[in-house]
Amino acid sequence: MLRILEEKTTDDLTILRLDGRIVGQWVEVLRESCEQAFQSNGSLALDLTGVNFADHEGVRLLRQLDQRQIKLINCSPFLQEQMKPTTKSLSPGGSTSE
């Protein structure tokens, strides 16, 4: 479950405070909430203090939001590590030596 609380600030910034896990159906709920808040204000931040886990799709959404200049604040070290881009390039068939 994911709880999303919207907080307005005086400088035209909307902060969405998240509590729970960014998994499954909640990824799409978060995406929609971000789109609505972003269109209303144009300046958005996600407070990730209460997020204790994000699955692959959740991490991918957070990366996309970060690339759109949406601020991710209070991100746990665990979540920061998950969000790091992978540098491995794996070929589908693996590597073979001849």
Image (spheres, helix red, strand yellow):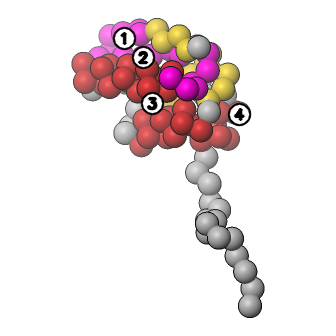
| Residue identified by numbered label 4 | 78
User: Which comes before the other along the chain, label 1 or label 3?
Assistant: 1
Q: Write down the quadrant of residue 64 in the picture.
A: top left
CB under 8 Å between callouts 3 and 2? no
Location of residue 10 (image quadrant): top left
User: Quarter of the image containing the C terminus?
Assistant: bottom right
Three-letter amino acid code at disc 4?
Phe
Crowding near the residue tagged with mark 1, few <14, some 14–19, many ≥20 C-alpha atoms within 10 Å: few
* Residue for badge 3: 71
Image coordinates of residue 20 in percent, x first then y, are 61, 15
Taking 46 as reference, is 66 above or below it? below
Q: From which residue to which does the magenta span run?
A: 6-25
Residue depicted at 44% across the width and 16% down the height = 16
Q: Tag 4: Cα neighbours inside 10 Å, few (<14), some, or many (≥20)?
A: few
In the image, is residue 9 above or below residue 29? above
Are the residues tagged 2 and 1 within 8 Å (C-beta)?
yes
**How would you rate the neighbour count of disc 2 (Cα within 10 Å): few for under 14, some for 14-19, many for 20 or more?**
many
Q: Which residue is mark 1?
A: 9
Q: Going 44% across and 26% down the picture, which residue do you hit?
A: 28
Q: Earlier in the sequence, mark 1 or mark 4?
A: 1
State the residue lying farthest toward the left.
40
Whole-angstrom CA distance, mark 2 to mark 1, is: 8 Å
**Distance from Cα at disc 4 to Cα at disc 2:** 21 Å
